[in-house]
Image (spheres, rainbow, N blue to C red):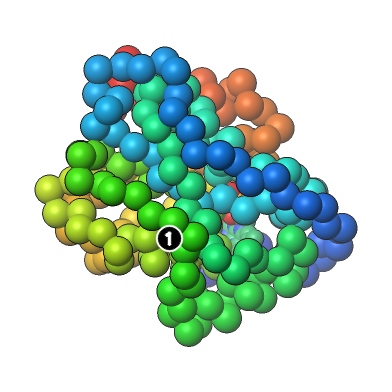
Amino acid sequence: MLFDSLRKFAIAALGLALFCSSPVPAEDSVSSGAVSSADKTIIVYFSRAGENYKVGIVERGNTELMAEMIAQKTGARTFRIEPVKAYSENYKECTEQANEELQNRSRPEIKKDIELESYTTIFLGYPIWWGDMPMPVYTFLEKHDFAGKTIIPFNTHEGSGQGVTVQRLKETTKADVLDGIAVRGSDVRNNPASTAANINAWLNKLGYK
Ligand SMILES: Cc1cc2nc3c(=O)[nH]c(=O)nc-3n(C[C@H](O)[C@H](O)[C@H](O)COP(=O)(O)O)c2cc1C
């Protein structure tokens, strides 16, 4: 089923031909609406601006928008994983780079890191790339010790759901990895109100009231 959705995704991806624009990187932020557990919770995410599948050229990535919805509700701080060498803003080129990195199990260098000691819960956000997480997310994960911590995955995709990522997170970290939530990137962007409502309902179930 995963491979079927990957195949459909790849076929659809080949049909896409758009243009590029300059992405505006988001600043790391501290959200205002603090709740009691916010200072022990952090939202770490990877997201790419530029040309993307189904959404055209965007200044901020879909997963970044999702991360902000989670920050809004939880009051947690956000941290963005950024590779030193940016991916192409051209969608097709980016898929080729990402595929090569996946095959080579690359660990692209990341621009900066954070101290995770004081956080017990890490919301981890990423887009699905070829059924998996982008390789810079692995770079980040392998730099830290997640023993005793909880990872709550959230991701955007265009058909693959969570792909193999929850399994990979369990293999890569010693964290308690929860089931997480997967949302279509185009829904985050085009239906923000209903997406935020779904995310808030999910967060309520997790105890973030
Ligand atoms: C390199 C690359 C590979 C992708 N591979 C998949 C995939 O295997 N399955 C899928 O459903 N979507 C795939 N997508 C679509 C993205 O997961 C989706 O557009 C996501 O919302 C992008 O998030 P972002 O804007 O935060 O980077 C891929 C996109 C890119 C750029």
Q: Which residue is depicted at the point 30% across and 66% down?
A: 142
Q: Which residue is depicted at the point 73% across and 53% down?
A: 50
Looking at this view, name the residue that lies furthest to the left: 148
Determine which quarter of the picture holds residue 18: bottom right
Q: Which residue is depicted at the point 51% across and 28% down?
A: 69
Give the x, y percent position of residue 99.
58, 76
**Mark 1 = which residue?**
137
Q: Is residue 32 above or below residue 172?
A: above
Dividing the image into 4 quarters, which one contains the C terminus?
top left
Amino acid type of disc 1?
Val
Q: Label 1, secondary structure: give it.
A: helix
Determine which quarter of the picture holds residue 137: bottom left
Q: Which residue is depicted at the point 63% across and 64% down?
A: 86
Of 72 and 54, nearer the camera is 72
Of 202 and 60, nearer the camera is 60
Give the x, y percent position of residue 139.
39, 66
Give the x, y percent position of residue 111.
49, 60
Can residue 141 be seen here?
Answer: yes
Can residue 161 be seen here?
Answer: no
Q: Quadrant of ligand 1?
A: bottom right
Q: Is residue 141 left or right of residue 65?
A: left
Give the x, y percent position of residue 93.
73, 72
Say few, some or many: other residues with alpha carbon within 10 Å of mark 1 (under 14 / 14 to 19 / 20 or more). many
Q: Is residue 56 left or right of residue 121?
A: right
